[in-house]
Amino acid sequence: MIIDKKEHIINIAIDLFAEKGYEGTSIRDLASKAEVNIAMINYYFGSKEKLFEAIVEYKSSYLRERLEEITNDTKKTDIEKIDAVIDHFVHRLLTNHKYHRVIHQELLLLQREKLHSTIIKSFSKNKELIKGIIENGMSKGVFRKVDPELTIVTITGTINQVMLSKSMCSIIMERGDDYDMYTDETFKKRIIQHIKQLIHAHLLIEQ
């Protein structure tokens, strides 16, 4: 697969930010690791902060496209759409764990207001799509009258919490310190099944 220079720089930046943090990563480090010159990075992004904003938009726009596909799928019921959202979230987090680590670092530190705002805005756009699915199910009498926003937090929060620590996942799965949760299909299926059971019980009205 051919990756253009801009996308290549973004992918390398995610690796470095996850490893060294935002403050610990310099444009010079990035240029060296990506094997490009500093002028090219400045041409595409202008600054490290603009680069970070580009990373957030790049990742969130892909997620938004997938959520729009799920929302607009007329063949799926509302609960099937929620299931598809859960499937996608778990898969994305496991395969893009470095990016999510970077995002969590920024949200927790609250050191850069503009970057924090960029992350929240991107999350809000995607949240509205999931909220629409839940509200549609409620309006049709398929779902209980629940708090849509906190239901979304329950889904994403459960995924994020279990992924906070490899050591925690090793204990849950009863594995050793060398356990790799990111490639374990059994672990992924277990998370997905648990969240679906939880959300089905929370949303669905017994017929």
Image (cartoon, rainbow, N blue to C red):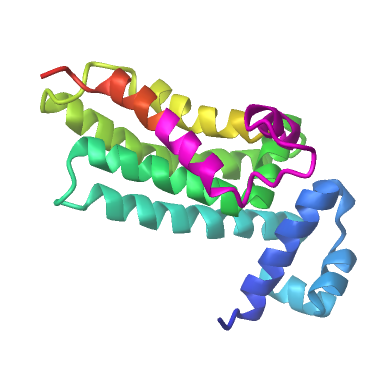
Q: Quadrant of the N terminus?
A: bottom right
Q: In this rendering, would 197 be left or right of 133? A: right
x, y (%) of residue 26? 87, 59
Which residue lies at the image location 19% right of the left edge and 30% below the top edge? 137
Q: Is residue 78 visible?
A: yes
x, y (%) of residue 106? 71, 39
Task: Indicate whether 151 appears above or below 47.
Answer: above
Task: Indicate whether 61 appears above or below 200.
Answer: below
Q: Quadrant of the C terminus?
A: top left
Which residue lies at the image location 27% right of the left edge and 42% below the top edge? 81
In the rendered structure, does residue 184 fall within the stretch colored magenta? yes
Task: Indicate whether 135 appears above or below 15.
Answer: above
Q: Residue extending furthest bottom? A: 2
x, y (%) of residue 13? 74, 61
Q: Is residue 122 visible?
A: no
Which residue lies at the image location 78% right of the left edge and 44% below the top edge? 178
- The span shown in magenta is 165-194
Q: In this rendering, would 75 be left or right of 194? A: left
Which residue lies at the image location 87% right of the left edge and 73% below the top edge? 32
Decide which of 31, 206 is in the foreground and name it: 206
Q: Quadrant of residue 145?
A: top left
Decide which of 144, 108 is in the foreground and name it: 144
Q: How many marks?
A: 0
Q: In this rendering, would 24 be left or right of 6? A: right
Decide which of 194, 148 is in the foreground and name it: 194
x, y (%) of residue 70? 29, 50
In the rendered structure, does residue 7 fall within the stretch colored magenta? no
Task: Indicate whether 6 appears above or below 84.
Answer: below
